[in-house]
Image: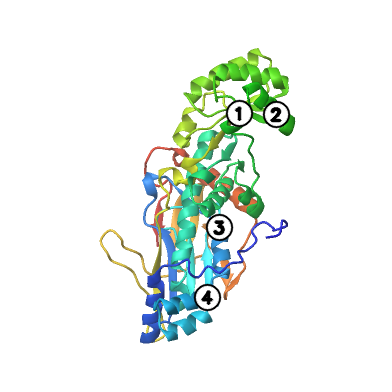
Amino acid sequence: MSQNVPQNAPQTYATALLTDRYELTMLQAALAAGTAHRGAVFEVFARRLPGGRRYGVIAGTDRVLDALEAFRFEDDDLEFLAAEGIVDDRTLAFLADYRFSGNVHGYREGEVFFPGSPILVVEGTFAEAVLLETVILSILNHDCAIAAAASRMAGAAGGRPLIEMGSRRTHEAAAVAAARAAYLCGFSSTSNLMAGRRYGVPTAGTAAHAFVLLHDSEKEAFRAQLDSQGLGTTLLVDTYDVAAAVRTAVEVAGDELGAVRIDSGDLAAVAVDVRRRLDEYGARRTGIVVTGDLDEFAIAALAAAPVDAYGVGTALATGSGHPTASLVYKLVARENAAGEMTPVAKRSVGKPSKGGRKWAYRRTENGRATGEIVTTAPVDGDDRPLLAELVRDGRVIGREPLDAARERHRSALTELPMEARSLSPGDPAVPTIFN
């Protein structure tokens, strides 16, 4: 890949086998029954928010568009399907020519959502749209889960910078997506270089304990790092004795040292002691970065501590205990034998859906969101439309820069009522109203 890859560059590899087998077996049966080419509408939504969270966050939409654009069956894919006897010859012929030619509308990245919000609406034939279920859900369930956790962490940080450091705690591809979602929702940088290259996320990183242990003394390690990275670097001070390391750091770097990092112990108490020592040594402008199994609750608990930035790894990369956004992809309307579109819905106990293609609007009063209005027909009025056109007749038209989504998330949060910021489990901050 070229070093000059633009931000949001589409994927160049086929994504069609990033799916479940039953998508193809349904297609085969529908082709045989003569129903595969009936018009269909699928919607992505959450029946509930995981963990009693107050709002969800849209992330991954542009990655879905990349995957949709690349969704095709190459010769070796078809050979695999044939060799395994997964589908018959008629289905293989259909797949060989597969290109999505329908329409997609969706909430923009950075927007918030609530139970029942139709965050993605896919319109096409059943054959075209059903094949996209797994890849769409795998992207959105992951990215929206990370985004929700990141948004809560950013709120708890109260404006202090957050560094995403979760690459070593998840799948290598998921790490890149997680860094993107975290940046979208308020993190300032990531340790993941691929996220920097592919999406333009600012990268950060200095040294680990191994670097200190490599050298004959902590002083030699600090001097080597400073010589290489300059005075603005961050020195890790908890490899041996924190108090001694802080003194050594200032002796070597002087009062212009950028920051020190604490990765263990009672972070609040240690940060207070480190701040006192730095001030005594004249390093009043040297910052304190804390890391070490932080989540939104630990970050909130450090609000009164003299901490200047946080590094978050495991909790961020795993959705802070909720690694999926609980999104589903359901058929809500289909063409009947007479050629008319008709609503359809599941009636399963605990898993009902609402039939009919949906439109969604955000109702506000005095700048605060008061309702998520979901309708089965478009309406005019003062409520803000939430569904944007993303794909028209198979052509992607809805990509946007990541910074635009980042700004949208800032704006969406200011619109939410105050209780949305609560970290305790509770009801959604905005009710969903079905009309």
Look at the numbered discs 1 and 2 and tell me whether their residues touch, using CB distance below 8 Å: no
Spatial separation of the CA atoms under disc 1 and disc 4 = 49 Å
Q: Residue extending furthest left?
A: 349
Spatial separation of the CA atoms under disc 2 and disc 4 = 51 Å
* Residue nearest the observer in this picture, 244 or 277: 244
Q: Is residue 260 above or below residue 73?
A: above
* Residue nearest the observer in this picture, 211 or 99: 211
Q: Amino acid at mark 4?
A: Asp
Q: Earlier in the sequence, mark 4 or mark 3?
A: 4
The disc label shown at residue 108, or none: 3
Q: Secondary structure at mark 1?
A: helix
Spatial separation of the CA atoms under disc 1 and disc 3 = 45 Å
Q: Amino acid at mark 1?
A: Val
Look at the numbered discs 2 and 4 and tell me whether their residues touch, using CB distance below 8 Å: no
Residue 206 at x, y percent in the picture: 64, 35
Q: Earlier in the sequence, mark 2 or mark 4?
A: 4
The disc label shown at residue 76, or none: 4
Q: Amino acid at mark 2?
A: Ala
Q: Earlier in the sequence, mark 1 or mark 4?
A: 4
Pointer 1: what residue?
A: 212
Q: Quadrant of residue 333?
A: bottom left
* Residue nearest the observer in this picture, 224 or 433: 224
* Residue nearest the observer in this picture, 309 or 115: 309
Residue drawn at x 57%, y 26% is 307
State which mark lies toward you, 1 or 3: 1
Spatial separation of the CA atoms under disc 2 and disc 3 = 46 Å
Report whether residue 286 is seen: yes
Q: Amino acid at mark 3?
A: Arg
Q: Secondary structure at mark 3?
A: loop
Pointer 2: what residue?
A: 224
Residue 360 at x, y percent in the picture: 48, 61
